[in-house]
Amino acid sequence: YHIGNLLFVVWMSDTGALICGRTMKSTISQCQAKSKHNKQKGFFLEFLQSISPGKTMYGLLGAIITGPISAILYPMAFAPTNEIDDSLASRATLGFILAIAGIIGDLAESSVKRLSSKKDSGKLLPGHGGVVD
């Protein structure tokens, strides 16, 4: 149950980051094309993109929002009713911590792939970057 919760929260925060980042990136790109405004990147975003070029601040926010929501929903769906004894606040905090840990792990793995000149860490999960992702 606990391993499933951990994996679910990390996977869902990663999925939330992907969906939110791509959705907002295309929306922002369309708005910038209309206004011809060139927004300067901050140091943090430049740092993230030096490790993994597809990262956006919107994706980061998507992961941080999706993690706690997933941590709250997982026990409701998969735990036996008598085992849910922790508060919503503790589950949300756990989700936030796991989302941050997932982001750091994703950046570390992207850094290793970049240093080794590999795009994917394996071929078992096509389109996902490999099993390590």
Image: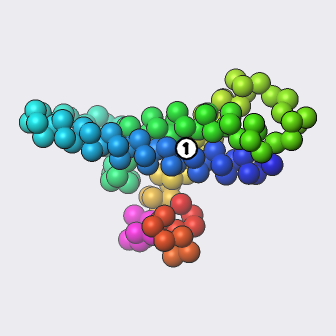
- Name the residue nearer the viewer: 12 or 120: 12
Question: Residue 7 at x, y = what percent?
Answer: 67, 51
Residue depicted at x 52% and y 48% = 14
- Looking at this rendering, what residue extends furthest in the right direction? 82
Taking the view exactly as shown, the residue that stands out farthest to the bottom is 123
**How many numbered markers are drawn?**
1
Q: Quadrant of residue 101?
A: top right
Q: Is residue 13 left or right of residue 49?
A: right
- In-front residue for pair 108/34: 34
Residue 110 lies left or right of residue 77; in this view the side is left
Residue 129 is at least partly visible in this image: yes
Q: Is residue 86 above or below residue 55?
A: above
Left or right, residue 87 beside residue 19: right
Q: Which residues are magenta?
A: 113-120
Amino acid on which the number 1 mark rests in the picture: Ser
Q: Residue 31, position in %: x, y?
A: 18, 35
Q: Is residue 116 above or below residue 39?
A: below
Q: Which residue is mark 1?
A: 13
User: Residue at horizontal 70%, vertical 47%?
Assistant: 6
Is residue 6 rendered magenta in the image? no
**Label 1: element kind:** helix
Q: Is residue 97 visible?
A: no
Residue 117 is a magenta residue: yes
Residue plotted at (68% across, 36% down): 73
Q: Quadrant of residue 20?
A: top left
Residue 114 position in % (x across, y down): 39, 64
